[in-house]
Amino acid sequence: MIKKIILSACLLFTLVSFAQESASSPYSFYGIGELMFKGTVENRSMAGVAVEQDSIHINLENPASFANLALTSFTVGATYNGTKLQSNSKEEKASRTTLDYLAVGLPLGKLGVGFGLVPYSSVGYKIQSLASVADQNNSRYNGSGGLNKAFVGAAYKITPNFNVGADVNYNFGTIKTNNLEYITGVTLGSRELSTSTLSGVNFNLGAMYKRKITPKLNFYSSINYSLESTLNSKNTRNIATVFYNYAFDTTVVDVLLEEKTEKKLTFPSKLSLSAGVGESRKWLVGGKVAYQKATAEANTYNAVDNVGYGRYGSISLGGYFIPNYASFNNYLERIVYRGGFRYEKTGLMVNSKSINDMAITVGVGMPITGSFSNVNVGLELGRRGTAAAGLVREDYANISVGLSFNDKWFQKRKFD
C-alpha cells in the first residue's frame, strides 16, 4: 500500500510544485523569493529543532538522520497560510495553500538513503501603486515562480550513537515578473516582462551524536554544513508598448527592447548547530542556531538601490512531550505534543531596516492505530518585517498537515 501512496503522491507533487503560487508577500520580490522550506511538520512544530535520532520520522534538516530509520518511511506535508499585510496607511489580507515537501527514506542496515522534492523559495505578489494626481503614471507589479530542490542523500551509522551523512541538491525553477505602467483612462501603457530560469547544485554535510547521561536521560547533538554554491540564472527582459483592458490583460503593440543575459548568484556556506536533552519516547527539549555570511542575491530584474543583503542568523527553542507512548486504553496519552519559538534575521535590508521573522509554534502528532504511521498537525503564528520606513509588516498564521507512512520493505516472504 505504501508503494502505491508514494507513486501517486510523487506524480501529484511534481505537477503541483510547478503550478502553485506559494507566496503572498511583497518581500518575495527580493533575492530568490520568500524562503519556504522550514522542515517537516514534526520539526516545524518545534520551531525547527530536529536533533533527536528518530527512527520513524524523516528529518530533512540533516542528511545524517537517514541512518536512524528503522522502517521505510514516506512523508508529505502541506500548509494553509493566512497573512495580514499592514503599512502605515493601508491593510490587506491574503491566503494560500501549498505543498511543502515529499520525501522517502530507506533503511539499509547501517546505511540509510533518502530522496525527495522540496519547494525551497517562492515569488508571489500583486501590488498596485495609484497616482494621487490625474494624468500621472500608475503602476501594477506582479511576480510568480520560485526555486525547487530535488535531493538525494545517504548516511552511515559509524557507531550505535554516531552517524554521518551527505546529500546533493539539484536546484531549479523559474521566476517571472510583470510590471505595467499606465494612465487611468488611457488603454495604452508600457510593460516590462522579465523571466529568470534558475539551476544549480549544492551539497550538505551532516553528523549526529547521542550519549547517555543517566539510565533514562540522553544528550543529543547535530551539526549540518552547507557548502558554498552557485546558482545559474538565464534572464530575458522584454519592454513593450501594450494595450490593456479592465482585467489588465495585455496585447503587445510594439517591442521596444528585448535582451538576454546570464548571471551567477553566489550563496555562501551555512552552518547549523543543535543540541538537546530528553528521555526517549517521553520528552525532549532542544535548541538550534544557524549562521550564514552575507549573500549577493540580487538578480538583473530586482537590483534596487535601497536594498541590501546582510548576514543570516537564527535561533530556535523547542521540544515535545508524550504522556505514555505505550498506552493501550487511552489514545490521548499516545499523542505527541510539540511546541517552540524561533527568531530569524533574514539578512534582507530594505530602506535601512532589517526584515526579521519571529514565530511561536505548537503541534500534535497523532499515531495511526495498528501501525507505526502518524498524522502531524502544526500551527505557526508569526510576524515578518515592519511598517516603519514605508515598509510592510506581515502577521501570519500557518496551519500545516503532514503524513508520515512507515512500513517494512525488502522482507523475504515466508509463504508463496
Image (cartoon, grey):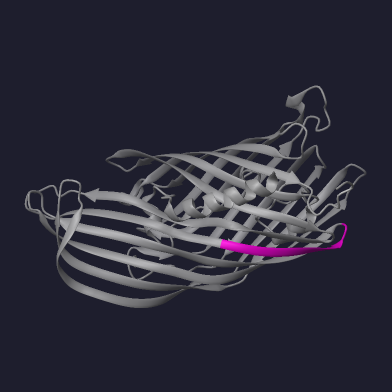
Q: Residue, x 58% and y 45% (percent of image)? A: 77
Q: Quadrant of residue 366?
A: top right
The residue closer to the viewer here, 411 or 123, is: 411
Q: Residue, x 34% and y 77% (percent of image)? A: 261
Start-end of magenta stretch: 150-160
Would residue 49 be seen by someone viewing this image from the given angle? Answer: no
Q: Above or below — where is 85 with respect to 227?
A: above
Q: Above or below — where is 119 with respect to 261?
A: above
Would residue 71 be seen by someone viewing this image from the given angle? Answer: yes
Q: Residue, x 82% and y 27% (percent of image)? A: 327
Residue 346 picture location, percent across and down: 49, 56
Which residue reaches farthest right?
215
Residue 158 belongs to magenta span: yes
In the visual, does 305 lie left or right of 368? left
The residue closer to the viewer here, 121 or 17, is: 17
Residue 113 belongs to magenta span: no
In the visual, does 219 lie left or right of 177? right
Secondary structure that dominates the magenta span: strand
Residue 158 picture location, percent across and down: 85, 64
